[in-house]
């Protein structure tokens, strides 16, 4: 039993080490070679288009349910729905916007990157890149990494606004809070640090999603079955890593005075 | 010149290569023959640094490719090669023309889009394909994919060309066109090649020398004539394609 655990632990350490090497590779590539704009924009476009609808739907309902729950809870405590805008605003800008967007992107984009690169790996397309004057990191990794790093914060901003809007619909339409009160509650407490807090986390989550998907894709083996395994693995690992790192990132950012 | 010295490789507990020695001289076409699963493709991949040996050295123009850890230097060696993969390994997301022009655009940064496409067309014509530049690899037949892979491997005029089963899946006439092309590349351009094939007709035609890989080692090496008239019972059985002889194919686990 202990030897099994030890083995697992060593395997995890080794994988983390390999993934860290890949991150090093990515950055070396970015600094050393001109980034191919065409590949970058193709990826960025795909990430945006593929995620827009699902991020929008997720966010609007999250904003709505937040307003609903806060409103009812505070009605029980204070006898009236106070601070709904404040709670919705803080929760969305600092936590739910970045975290839920990252999780949606991990499921939608991370999975498809892992499947695509995994298929290329098992059909030797990754090997072929080496004899054709480029490397998988440069040709496939860098555009996906940079595109995710750009698009996840952009999608987070979009999710923030849609979420606030969802809260507005319920606060005004269902709880009967006057619109100006809701907006005041949202705006008065949201400062630049709060927004920065969310967006910095979004960038970190983007790195997690892209690196996990690329790493898992590049190390796929075992044919079609292996590609399936990689796809699932990429999503699960990304989601867990996002949620765990979220706690530590939040604590760190607050400690240094951002948010 | 490529020199393979004492190459060992195992996957898990399965030994595939057990001390392969093989020298590939400038300007020759060496063909590696051997049973399915004996490690021919694995040997080829070691030559271009796509796999790392457990033991042994592979010298490409005097540089040990297995000992090169600097990425840039490794790329420099890999770029001397054109590689036809056994499964063609065409990029699904690109058109046939873009596939063939891919290496050219990366390795000759000055070349224009238009010029690269013209070269692609020309190389596709060499392998007997016309009007396919705009198709996607998924729209091609197996034999067509193989030929596109071949066109891509030769497009940037590499010094060394590695062919993993260039004629598998092709009809006899197209096979012969490919054989002629391989011979011509050697005669006219002095390209050095290593091929793997099961097609003995092709092996005799394209090779200056033939090497047979068996149980992880090169057990025979000679000119096509020497191989054809060999007295080595293993080689003889293989080249005549007989199921009777010293080489036994395992049909059941218990055998
Ligand atoms: N990436 C890999 N991981 C594990 N085992 C491998 C890998 N590549 C090859 N092998 C094993 O190495 C052995 C040799 O494989 P290889 O592909 O070189 O055979 P081959 O001689 O090219 O056969 P064929 O003529 O059928 O193509 C096989 O038993 C195969 O299972
Ligand atoms: Mg093979």
Image (cartoon, rainbow, N blue to C red):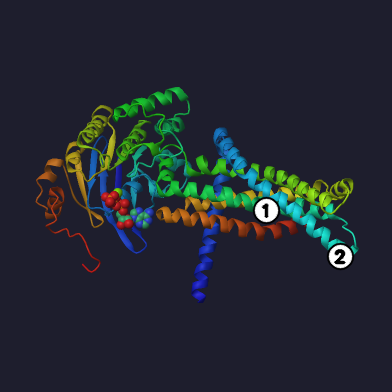
Residue A234, percent across and down? 54, 55
Q: Secondary structure at mark 2?
A: helix
Where does label 1 land, which residue? A100
- The image quadrant of residue A76 is bottom right
Front position among marks 1 and 2: 2
Circle 1: is it few (<14), some (14-19), or many (20+) Cα within 10 Å? many
Task: Identify the disc placed on residue A76.
Answer: 2
Is residue A185 in sight in this rendering?
A: yes
Percent x, y of residue B45: 35, 47
Give the distance between the C-alpha atoms of the residues marked 1 and 2, in whole angstroms: 28 Å
* Image position of B174 with respect to B86: above or below: above
Residue A207 in picture, x, y percent from top left: 62, 49
Q: Quadrant of ligand 1?
A: bottom left
Q: Chain of mark 1?
A: A
Element carrying mark 1: helix
- Residue B54 in view, yes or no: no
Q: Nearer the viewer, residue A4 or A97?
A: A97
Residue at 23% in and 33% down? B174
């Amino acid at each position: 039993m202990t030897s099994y655990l030890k083995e697992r632990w060593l395997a995890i350490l080794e994988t983390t080490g390999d993934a860290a090497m890949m991150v090093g590779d990515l950055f070396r590539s970015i600094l050393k070679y001109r980034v191919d704009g065409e590949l970058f924009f193709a990826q960025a476009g795909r990430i945006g288009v593929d995620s827009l609808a699902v991020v929008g739907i997720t966010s609007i309902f999250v904003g709505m349910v937040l307003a609903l729950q806060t409103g009812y809870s505070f009605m029980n405590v204070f006898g009236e729905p106070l601070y709904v805008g404040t709670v919705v605003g803080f929760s969305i800008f600092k936590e739910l916007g970045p975290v839920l967007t990252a999780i949606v992107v991990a499921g939608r984009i991370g999975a498809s990157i892992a499947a695509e690169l995994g298929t290329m790996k098992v059909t030797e397309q990754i090997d072929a890149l080496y004899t054709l004057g480029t490397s998988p990191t440069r040709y496939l990794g860098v555009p996906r990494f940079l595109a995710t790093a750009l698009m996840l914060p952009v999608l987070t901003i979009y999710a923030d606004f849609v979420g606030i809007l969802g809260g507005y619909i319920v606060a005004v339409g269902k709880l009967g809070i006057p619109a100006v009160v809701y907006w005041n509650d949202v705006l008065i407490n949201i400062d630049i640090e709060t927004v920065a807090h969310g967006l910095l986390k979004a960038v970190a989550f983007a790195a997690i999603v892209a690196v996990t998907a690329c790493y898992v894709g590049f190390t796929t083996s075992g044919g079609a079955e292996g590609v399936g395994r990689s796809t699932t693995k990429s999503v699960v690992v990304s989601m867990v890593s996002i949620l765990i790192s979220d706690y530590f990132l939040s604590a760190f950012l607050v400690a240094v005075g951002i948010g | 010149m490529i020199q393979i010295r004492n190459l060992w490789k195992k996957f898990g507990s399965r030994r595939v290569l057990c001390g392969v020695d093989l020298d590939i001289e400038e300007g020759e076409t060496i063909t590696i023959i051997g049973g399915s699963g004996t490690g021919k493709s694995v040997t080829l991949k070691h030559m271009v640094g796509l796999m790392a040996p457990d033991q042994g050295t592979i010298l490409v123009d005097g540089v040990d490719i297995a000992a090169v850890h600097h990425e840039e230097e490794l790329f420099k060696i890999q770029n001397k090669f054109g590689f036809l993969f056994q499964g063609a390994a065409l990029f699904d997301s690109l058109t046939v023309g873009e596939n063939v022009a891919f290496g050219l655009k990366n390795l000759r940064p000055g070349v224009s889009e238009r010029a690269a496409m013209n070269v692609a067309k020309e190389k596709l014509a060499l392998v007997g394909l016309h009007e396919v530049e705009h198709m996607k690899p998924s729209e091609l037949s197996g034999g067509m994919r193989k030929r596109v892979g071949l066109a891509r491997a030769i497009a940037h005029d590499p010094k060394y060309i590695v062919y993993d089963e260039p004629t598998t899946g092709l009809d006899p006439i197209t096979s012969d066109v490919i054989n002629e092309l391989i011979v011509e590349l050697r005669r006219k351009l002095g390209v050095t090649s290593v091929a793997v094939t099961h097609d003995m007709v092709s092996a005799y035609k394209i090779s200056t020398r033939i090497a047979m890989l068996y149980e992880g080692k090169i057990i025979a090496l000679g000119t096509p004539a020497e191989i054809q008239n060999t007295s080595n019972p293993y080689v003889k059985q293989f080249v005549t394609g007989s199921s009777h002889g010293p080489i036994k194919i395992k049909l059941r686990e218990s055998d």
